[in-house]
Amino acid sequence: MKKITIVGCMALAGCVSATPGSHKVVLTNNAGMVSGCKFLGQHTVSSLQQFTPDVNRKDIETTLKNKIAEVGGTHGVTPGPVAQNVNSLLQTADVYRC
């Protein structure tokens, strides 16, 4: 029973937990949203593909939001969809504080 509960939770939520402040981070591909904001740098995160595509994307999004919040950013501008290969996902974002 315990295994079913753990697997069930992982399938719904993924493996990555949000850190404080990351829930306020906005990810977008619209560079106009950050007009006038301070550019903080570019960050790339990767994640192994371990679950369903939706859970994998949620994990990489949470990881990226965590990183943006960690450096004091409020917005991440991504170039497009998450890049993927056979084993992993990769996402890059320009980080801004607005």
Image: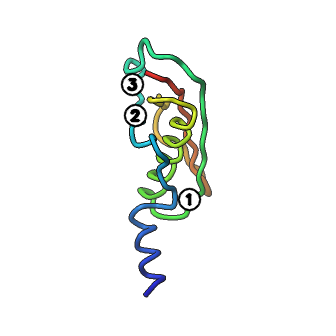
Q: In the image, residue 51 lies at what x, y percent?
A: 49, 64
Q: Which residue is mark 1?
A: 49
Taking the spot 56% from the left edge, 48% from the top edge, the residue there is 84
Q: Amino acid at mark 1?
A: Gln
Q: Which residue is mark 3?
A: 30
Q: Nearer the viewer, mark 2 or mark 1?
A: 2
- Label of residue 70 in the image: none
Q: In the image, residue 91 lies at what x, y percent?
A: 55, 40
Give the CA separation, mark 2 to mark 1. Answer: 23 Å
- Placement of 34 over or under 93, stated as above or below: above
The local secondary structure at tag 3 comes to loop
- Placement of 46 over or under 43, stated as above or below: below
Which residue occupies the foreground of this view, 29 or 21? Answer: 21
Give the CA separation, mark 1 to mark 3. Answer: 27 Å
In the shown orientation, is residue 70 left or right of residue 20? right
In the shown orientation, is residue 16 left or right of residue 54? right
Q: Which residue is mark 2?
A: 26
The local secondary structure at tag 2 comes to strand
Q: In the image, residue 74 lies at what x, y percent?
A: 45, 29
Q: Nearer the viewer, mark 3 or mark 2?
A: 2
Taking the spot 55% from the left edge, 63% from the top edge, the residue there is 50
- Placement of 4 over or under 40, stated as above or below: below
